[in-house]
Image: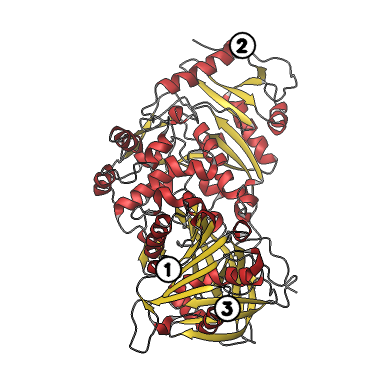
Amino acid sequence: MTPARTDPWVPEPISIKRIARESADTATLVLDTSERPGGFAFKPGQFNMLYAFGIGEVPISISGDPSDTGELVHTIRVVGKVTEALTGMAPGSTLGLRGPFGTHWPLEEARGRDVLIVAGGLGLVPLRPAIYEILKNRSAYKRVNIVYGARTPQDILFSNEISEWRGRLDVSLRVTVDSAGSDWFGHVGVVTSLVKLARFDPEATVAMVCGPEIMMRFAVRELETQGIADERIYLSTERNLQCGVGLCGHCQHGNVFVCKDGPVFRYDRLAPFFSKREV
Amino acid sequence: MPIGYQERPLVPLDVGDRAILRPDQLSGILAALRGRGYTLLGPTVRDAAIIYAEIAGADDLPVGWTDVQSPGSYRLAARPDGAFFGYSVGPHSWKATFHRPEITLWQAERQGDGGFTIHEPAPETSRVALIGVRACELAAIRIQDRVLLDGPFADPHYAARRRDVFVVAVNCTEPGDTCFCASMGTGPGVESGFDLALTEFVTDTEHLFLAEIGSGAGAEVLAEWPVDRATHGQIAAAAARTQAAAQRMGRSVDTRDVKEVLARNLENPRWEETAARCLGCTNCTQVCPTCFCTAVHDLTDLSGRTATRVRQWDSCFDRSFSYVHGGSVRRSGMSRYRQWLTHKMSFWADEFGSLGCVGCGRCITWCPKGIDITAEIAAIRAADPS
């Protein structure tokens, strides 16, 4: 039994159950939380701080199913030495865990409405728990649209699930890539171009967006053009996160702290400074 | 005009009461605090500056010294009157006492099975008496309390060090050229958050302190001494000295709608002009009593068996401060200066319910280029298109 932690700065050791490669630079780690009291409960959109012994700690979105508390799933792209170490670990080895932290996707608010999910690249990772929840309670939502853009067909994450969701009659899922060879039959182009193809009622749609900041700027513009109000557009943003609990100051973005006020924000909260350079 | 001292029979004093103390009585009170187990932290002269450090008693105070400050300049000067608190504020703030510049958060130890265990040092506690705390400093402590204790997660290290503190405040009668607390509404008089608050009177003929009791602990310490209850005239004279300090303050900030003015001027060309002067040295954030940002560093020993996480003060002027994979968000000096100033004077209010500046003037004095936050705000306001 792991004792309850009261010091938010201190990680708890947790062991890796399995690792799966998602693409050339991305892997999914499944952590064993079955021994923890209560397992590991979180809300879709939240993140954890993951620590590789002696190397460092990084914020990573939770990508698993929130209803499964015995496992904790993280999908990680290698972008530096900590993520390289984490994705290079073997099953059975131990990493450090702090969390869950941050705000979550507005799944309650979206009930009874159309849902439009816009994901770019690794942005699909924090959205996947929300997709699981929505599909599990499918009748609570009206039309469900998912649009997803990746760099190349090889970079498409969770391709088995993507195929499965695409096969459903109660979900519209569209995928695009930036560039592809001749064996790709799908869309080529930016993800925002898929928003136009989705069918939804802009007056009664909740949009959830995650991807690179530049992509989110264009996505917000497109969603606004389609008539979705800023109050029903939600983004998950990224900044330098070190403490994860609102104490270290690194993740300030205008008048919010990404770690405690976000990472999921209603867009009108960010609008005054979101498109300003270097804020 | 002398305010006069006359010893009277011992009377019990209560919170809100005021007494008159001679310097030897103040020395005695400091000794009494030590006797109660408090470590005395107070102003003292070291390395040509008045800094805060452990003091043995009143003899270690900067007796007969003052400081002369201006943008980019700080010098000590002798004063003939033997005042204990005849200076404004130096490069140190009480931030270093509660929010330590560097602490070890934890250590991890490799186990034989490939796992590791984590050891947390118990947060360091201390029983400290702060001597000579100005109103601006009390305001800064309150601001750091909100940031580090009142959020969704409290910092246990800060909390442990804040737990047992006795505050001997001093009403400021020596504002410096770079001070602007009066305009920020944080001074020069102290209003709350102290156990004892002193006002110093020093002339050719007398040296006295008016002491206001702010807490039961303050009353208890004072009760050990046969002190003179202050008269209405003495209380009025003390208030007049603090009011005069407000009038003599070197600078001011127009705080009306400053939050909105800065928030709507993120693209004002003035930021570039200021950034051309800013060296990015981080002095302003190090001397600022409210700047709270920290970075964590992971260290390993040579064997690779022990890993230590250390937390240090950080600065938003450092390019790596905003690093995310692929590069820093705030790459330009312009954006970093803008971040610092808009955070203090605008965004802080949305985050923590007050501005993040107390008007102590340290960032002006200790800026090697003498960049003046009050002038910068005025310039943005003047260039505000709306």
| Residue A197 badge | 1
Number of residues whose C-alpha sits closer than 10 Å to that of mark 1, classed few (under 14), some (14–19) or many (20 or more): few
Number of residues whose C-alpha sits closer than 10 Å to that of mark 3, classed few (under 14), some (14–19) or many (20 or more): few
**Which amino acid, mark 1?**
Leu
| Residue A168 badge | 3
Gap between marks 3 and 2 measured at Cα: 84 Å
Gap between marks 3 and 1 measured at Cα: 18 Å
Of the 4 image quadrants, the one containing the N terminus of chain A is bottom right
> Mark 2, mark 1: which one is toward the viewer?
1
Chain to which the residue tagged by mark 2 belongs = B
- How many marks on residues? 3
Identify which residue is drawn at 55% across, 12% down.
B3
Q: Is residue B214 left or right of residue B12?
A: left
Q: Nearer the viewer, residue B183 or B234?
A: B183
Labels 3 and 1 share a subunit: yes
Chain to which the residue tagged by mark 3 belongs = A
Q: Quadrant of residue B87?
A: top left
Q: Nearer the viewer, residue B169 or B290?
A: B290
